[in-house]
Amino acid sequence: MAESMTEQPAAGEGQGKKPKLDLSGAEWLSSTQGVGDVQIAFVEGYIAMRDGRNPDGPALIFTPAEWRAFVLGARDGEFDLT
């Protein structure tokens, strides 16, 4: 399995980059509810999210604050496509 890493700047931080995370040994979790193949993993204080149908593909990396904003937005319907 290919290593997934990131060097994306943290949203709202503006001071540097997120660390490179080795996700090769991450424990990926899937929801038991809903439809979809999104998986998340908690690694070194960050939250990684990937497409479970493409586990060797890229992963999005969130700080805890970014993850909280994402989850709250999703709950409020911010990302609904309909």
Image (cartoon, rainbow, N blue to C red):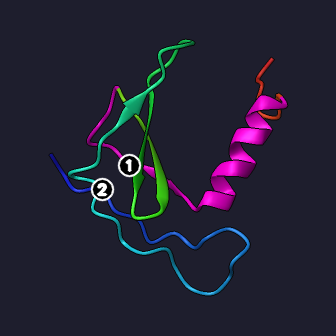
Q: Label 2 sits on what residue type?
A: Ser
Q: CA distance from mark 2 to mark 1?
A: 6 Å
Are dots 2 and 1 in contact, CB under 8 Å? yes
Q: Read off the residue under disc 1.
A: 58
Q: Position of residue 35 (x, y in %)?
A: 53, 12
The residue at 47%/15% (across/down) is 32
Residue 25 relative to residue 76: left or right = left
- Is residue 79 covered in magenta? no
For marks 2 and 1, the one nearer the N-term is: 2
Instruction: Identify the secondary structure beneath mark 1.
Output: loop
Q: Alpha-carbon neighbours of circle 1 within 10 Å: few (<14), some, or many (≥20)? A: some
Please tell me how many numbered marks the rendered image carries: 2
| Residue stretch in magenta | 53-76
Q: Tell me where residue 6 appears, x and y as whole percent.
A: 41, 65
> Which amino acid type corresponds to the residue marked 1 in the rendered image?
Pro
Q: Secondary structure at mark 2?
A: loop
Mark 2 residue crowding within 10 angstroms, few (<14) / some (14–19) / many (20+)? some
**Position of 77 compared to 21: left or right?**
right
The quadrant in which the N terminus is found is top left
Q: Residue 29: horizontal and vertical position, in percent?
A: 39, 33
Q: Is residue 18 above or below residue 4?
A: below
* Occupied quadrant, residue 79: top right
**Residue at position x 54%, y 13% in the image:** 33
Q: Which mark is residue 4?
A: 2
Q: In x, y percent, where is residue 5?
A: 34, 62
Asked if the stretch drawn in magenta spans residue 74, the answer is yes
Q: Residue at x 82, y 28 (%)?
A: 77
The vertical placement of 33 against 69, above or below, is above
